[in-house]
Amino acid sequence: MSDSAAAHVSHGHHQELSFIRKYIFSLDHKMIARQFLFQGLVMLLIGGTLAMLIRWQLAWPETAVPGLGFISEPYIFPGEHGGGIIPSQTYNALFTMHATLMIFFVVMPIMVGTLGNFLIPLMIGAGDMAFPKLNMLSFWFAFVSGIVMLSSFFVPGGPAAGGWTSYATLSARPQYTGVDLGQNLWIIALMINGVSSLMGAINYITTIVNMRAPGMHYFRMPLTVWSLFVTAILLLLALPVLTAALAMLLFDRTMGTSFFLP
């Protein structure tokens, strides 16, 4: 068979990916990087809005914020000209959710998810990540985690208000913060996010160790790849412990255990 005929047959067997497979459930590392970037930018807008509300409260305490009058009590108290006054318990929730969104849903998706997925294969000469399907699952676990976290704004009692570190026992007893279901959703969202980051860490380490181009020794790798490599190793070591601690905190809140409560 001639080269032109072989190319024609190869082209005939090639099928264009559907919109869903190309843009939604993509296995391409560059598209997954864009998905992480888009999610991070959306969360940046939400987290930035919360930051502006925090700054307003610090600059003008107990002064009505324009446009917040549509939120009912006790989350926002009625103010002048359709505005709303931020009470102390809402301020605690704003601070908690702002920090949580910025760390776990902006910095991590953009700095690790986007840069790692986009740059690692290109910089080490690999065609893609070692586990493309695991890579896709990593994004979708992160996406579900974000949905669960944002849903806590709409449950009775409002979102978590125990600080973004949620130290026990402040976060272990609902009566301390006045938040029950919202804090539980916060814990569940971060557990899902931890599984997502664990998938990404396994993928990054395996890709860097096994899929470097010939001649790309460890000390020839760019510093960007080294930074992502070390970050993935640290995540692999830390996330199982943090996820287990989150599970124990959830058990203390829902099942009557005493991991953090004396």
Image: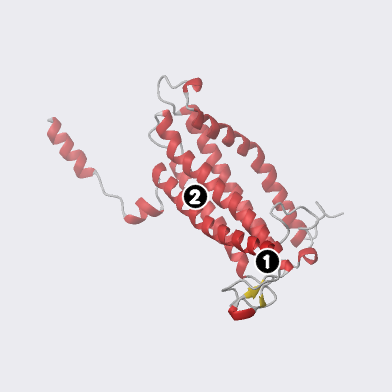
Q: Nearer the viewer, residue 260 or 45?
A: 45
Q: Name which quarter of the figure residue 211 lies in.
A: top left
Q: Is residue 258 left or right of residue 143?
A: right
Q: Residue furthest front?
A: 59
Q: On the image, numbered disc 1 is attached to which residue?
A: 60
Helix, strand or loop at label 1? It is loop
Residue 238 image offset from top left, x and y in percent = 66, 40
Q: Earlier in the sequence, mark 1 or mark 2?
A: 1
| Residue under the point 13% across and 35% down | 5
Relative to 88, say whether 3 is above or below. above
Question: Residue 139: which numbered mark, if any?
Answer: 2
Do labels 1 and 2 touch, CB within 8 Å?
A: no
Residue 248 image offset from top left, x and y in percent = 74, 52
Helix, strand or loop at label 2? It is helix
Residue 25 image offset from top left, x and y in percent = 41, 52
How many marks on residues?
Answer: 2
Q: Name which quarter of the figure residue 76 lies in.
A: bottom right
Mark 2 crowd level (few <14, some 14–19, many ≥20, 10 Å Cα)? many
